[in-house]
Image (spheres, grey):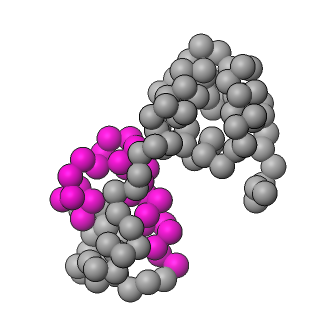
Amino acid sequence: IFSEPIDPRRAIKILNAGGLKPSRAVELLAHLPPEWIDVLSALSSRRGRSAVRAFITKWRHIPPPATGDDLRRWGIPPGPLYPKILKRLHAAKLDGRIRTEEDVKRTVLSFRPDL
C-alpha cells in the first residue's frame, strides 16, 4: 500500500529525464510491485529503460552504509531523526558521494556537528 497514488506519466517523465541520479530512481521504483516496474520500463524511452535496468540489476541491491545501531554507537540518540539520516546516507552512497566510513561519519556530522 502506498501513501500516495503513483502517477505513471510523471514516473515515466522522471525516468526519461537526463541525469537521473540512482537515489532518485530507487526512491521512485523501490516500493513498486514488479509488474509496475515492467510497465514503466515498457512505456519509457531507451534512457528510461536503461535506468530501470540499472535499478533492477544494481541500485536496488546496494545496502545503506549505516544502520540505526551504527548511529546509536556514534552517540546519536534514537528518535525521529534516524530515518532522515539513514535515507540521506543511502542516497549519498547510491549517488557515489559516500565511499568510505569517513564519508559516512562526515554526513552524519552534518546532522549532529557536536559529535
Rendered view: 47 above or below 71: above
98 with respect to 92 (left or right): left
Residue 20 visible from this viewpoint: no
In the displayed orientation, state which residue is furthest to the top.
46
Give the camera-side residue of 56 and 46: 56
Q: Which residues are magenta?
A: 80-105
Depth check, front residue: 33 or 49: 33
- The quarter of the rendered structure image containing the N terminus is bottom right
Which quarter of the image is occupied by the C terminus? bottom left
- Tell me the residue at 31%/67% (across/down): 108
Relative placement, left or right, of 1 versus 52 is right
Quarter residue 104 falls in: bottom left
Numbered disc total: 0
Identify which residue is drawn at 41% across, 45% down: 62
- In the rendered image, residue 71, in percent from the top left (x then y), is placed at 34, 74
Q: Is residue 35 visible?
A: yes
Asked if 88 appears above or below 61 in the picture, the reply is: below
Query: Where does the image place residue 24, in percent across and percent down from the top left?
Result: 53, 41
In the image: residue 68, left or right of residue 60: left
Q: Is residue 92 magenta?
A: yes
The dominant secondary structure in magenta is: helix
Residue depicted at x 39% and y 67%: 67
Find residue 4 and report its horizontal and vertical position in percent.
78, 54
**As rendered, which of 48 and 19 lies closer to the eye?**
48
Q: Residue at x 71, y 28 (%)?
A: 38
Residue 100 at what x, y percent from top left? 20, 52
